[in-house]
Image (cartoon, rainbow, N blue to C red):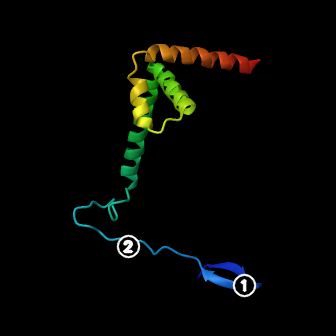
Amino acid sequence: MENFNKKIYDGKLKKEKIYQAPEPIQRRIPGMDDCQVNGTLLCNEKQKKLINNMNNIRISNEKYLREHPEINDIIGFFVSEVLKNKPKDIQEYASEILSSDTLKDDIEKYKEEYFEIKELNKK
């Protein structure tokens, strides 16, 4: 069954064939196990292991971020400064800001301003 895209030109209906990707070639490559086809597909067992591993990494990252709430403050401060100053070279700007001797004080000032704005928005 062919798929057509109907377009109207000068009051006349013309049919144009919609592009269809060719069927993938499935062949065994020497050295691959039964779970792989063209080196891209995983069997259910390997897929479950991959998903489990990804979930463990996410959980580990979440735990780390909860143990170090200052990371969120640093990120918030940095994003705020980037949006205020709109630097042309963000990597250079990040290097300057994050290596600043006054970083800790700048973040504290940012947090105070942030909480003041948050309180004003509640009213």
Q: Which residue is mark 2?
A: 25
Q: Residues within 10 Å of mark 1 (few under 14, many from 20)?
A: few
> Residue 37, which numbered label?
none
Q: Residue 28, percent across and down?
A: 29, 68
Identify which residue is drawn at 67% across, 20% down: 118
Question: Quick one: label 1 or label 2, which is nearer the N terminus?
Answer: 1
Most foreground residue, 52 or 95 = 95
The residue lying toward the viewer, choosing from 43 and 121, is 121
Above or below, comparing residue 25 to residue 40 in the picture: below
Q: Which residue is pictured at 67% across the width and 19% down the height?
A: 117
Quarter holding residue 103: top left
Question: Percent position (x, y) of residue 92?
Answer: 40, 34
Of the two numbered discs 1 and 2 in the rendering, the one whose residue sits closer to the viewer: 1
Is residue 60 shown above or below 7?
above
Give the mark count: 2
Q: What residue is shown with label 1?
A: 13
| Quadrant in the picture for residue 84 | top right
